[in-house]
Amino acid sequence: MIEFESDIQNCLPVLRAGGVILHPTDTVWGLGCDATNESAVSEIYALKQRPLTMPLIVLVPDEQDVLQHVAAPDLALFDYLKTCNQPTTVVYEGAIGFASNLLGADGSIAIRICADPFCRALLKRFGKPIVSTSANLHGSPTPSCFADIDPALIGKVGHVVGFRQSDPTKARSSTLIRWEKGVPMILRP
């Protein structure tokens, strides 16, 4: 059995019911929910006390998922992403099938193809994109490991993943880019 199988089994009913999970990603620990469920997305905004005008990031397991949820992405972007040395989130135009309160004012969506084994397994089993935003209150420092997460926030989610909680490795947020006419525009290094 995979070491995180029980966590996946515990996350799935929470996600399906529109709840929020606290989970490790390929970057920092994140608050996650069903990216197609408007009330679940609203719950994350409320938990983080984040302004609704600040869009959230979505995780998917594969390039194919980006193609299903974005209108006409430039395929050259996928070649660029393979050259990146750290996790990179891309702001895409023409989001399809996401909760409306997840999109930017211009209809864009920030998506990261996640390489983390736990996240990939969870995403594939859930079968939908998952919102993932850093596990902190808006304006507070991004926690670099599980031990840095505010205990009050931990107590407000439907499931806290046990996998990697004891890992002291300090993580950082992903690079954020917008792909414009074949050129990456860095929004967050």
Image (spheres, helix red, strand yellow):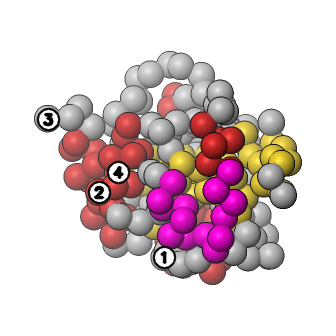
Q: Which element carries disc 4, helix, strand or loop?
A: helix
For badge 2, the amino acid type reads Arg
Q: Which element carries disc 2, helix, strand or loop?
A: helix
Label 2 vs label 3: CA separation?
15 Å
Q: Position of residue 104 (x, y in %)?
A: 75, 71
Q: Nearer the viewer, residue 41 or 130?
A: 130
User: Quadrant of the image for the N terminus?
Assistant: top left
Label 4 vs label 1: CA separation?
17 Å
Q: Residue 53's quadrant in the figure?
A: bottom right
Q: Relative to 148, is 156 on the left or the right?
A: left
Residues packed near mark 4 inside 10 Å, few (<14), some (14 to 19) or many (20 plus): many
**Circle 2 sits on which residue?**
125
Residue at figure coordinates x 67%, y 33% from the top left:
84
Q: Position of residue 123 (x, y in %)?
A: 38, 54
Q: Which element carries disc 1, helix, strand or loop?
A: loop
**Circle 3 sits on which residue?**
1
Q: Is residue 182 magenta?
A: no
Q: Which mark is residue 37?
A: 1
Q: Position of residue 40 (x, y in %)?
A: 50, 71
Label 3 vs label 4: CA separation?
15 Å
Counting residues from the N terminus, which is met first, the one under dot 3 or under dot 4?
Answer: 3
Q: Is residue 73 magenta?
A: yes
Q: Which mark is residue 85?
A: none
Can residue 151 be seen from the camera position used here? Answer: no
For badge 4, the amino acid type reads Leu
Q: Are marks 4 and 2 in contact (CB under 8 Å)?
A: yes
Can residue 3 be seen from the camera position used here? Answer: yes
Label 2 vs label 1: CA separation?
17 Å
Start and end of the magenta stretch? 63-76
**Circle 4 sits on which residue?**
122
Give the foreground label among 2 and 1.
2
Residue at figure coordinates x 41%, y 45% from the top left:
119
